[in-house]
Amino acid sequence: MEILKLKPVFKDYIWGGNRLVTDFGFNTGLDKTAEGWMLACHKDGMNTVDGGSLDGKPLGEIVDGISGNNAKRFPYFPVLIKLIDAFNNLSVQVHPDDEYARRVENEFGKTEMWYVLDAADGAELIYGFKEAISKEAFREAIEKGTLLDKLNRVKVKKGDVFFIEAGTVHAIGKGALIAEIQQNSNCTYRVYDYGRLGNDGKPRELHIDKAVDVSVCEPPKYGTKPMGEEIRFDGYVSQLLTSCSLFTVNKYKIEKSVKLFADENSFHHVLVIDGRGEIEGRKAKKGDSFLVPAGYGEYLVSGEIEILITNI
């Protein structure tokens, strides 16, 4: 099967801005564009194929045949990949693990990673707690409005990597532009939302009891640097950003070209985060999203282009 270019799905959450339009050139048709779902095979968002022999085909109709052997251990397409523009603070939130989510929500849990594409001066993320506290103290802090004093705030810059295991209380702060690779789930428990009102004029729903149930009330276990060092080759630089049982993400900064290989075990998702080039002779620019089927074999990426490669 051919390499597929995917058409994103856009979301207009109240905290979004316009950088997906101005920086990436998307025509979203929205006043605010909070997220672009770049690889999405979920009930809340489904990519379609953009061009080629399968133009307009929903990803869900073809994905089983191109995901690869490693994806077969999952009862669903494994990952969801987004671009996120935080013009304002996102809510403080937490995601359940698979066991809790299946039992309570009939959904899957959510572990994710963030790669910081850009950050305004002073931009912060919330990442776990400053120090370990009990669940009772967590609930009390929510009720008394002192939760933000308990949480770990991290100044962020371009190139930082955050691994957000299920159960980690977190929030993206205003001024951050993020690529997010996550479990294919949309299950989120909102803990604190700065008193904002939704489109209906009412405060947005909080999920305090469930959040307390699933949260790990401790400092984060992981740092904010990529897992691997940059490795220079002739024509490109590669770097392992993160690897876990759910997904592996590598970054390639290509100056000339790189030959990559998608074996039978996993698809490759190619997200262009900067520059221009070609993928197997097909033009590729910042913001483009391509799915290389498992078993495709060798493919060439060339140009002056920076990409994230996600596989299982």
Image: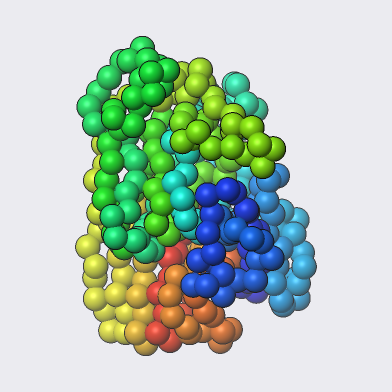
Residue furthest to the front: 201
x then y, percent, for residue 2: 65, 74
Q: How many labels were placed on the picture?
A: 0
x then y, percent, for residue 304: 40, 84
Residue 248 seen from this side: no
> Measuring 69% from the left and 54% from the top, which residue is drawn there?
46
Q: Quadrant of residue 229?
A: bottom left
> Measuring 54% from the left and 54% from the top, which residue is drawn there?
16
Compared with 32, 300 (above or below) is: below
Front in this rendered view, residue 294 or 62: 62
> Measuring 38% from the left and 18% from the top, which residue is drawn there?
144
Q: Quadrant of residue 31?
A: bottom right
x then y, percent, for residue 245: 42, 43
x then y, percent, for residue 212: 44, 20
Compared with 10, 220 (above or below) is: above
User: How was this image coloured?
Assistant: rainbow
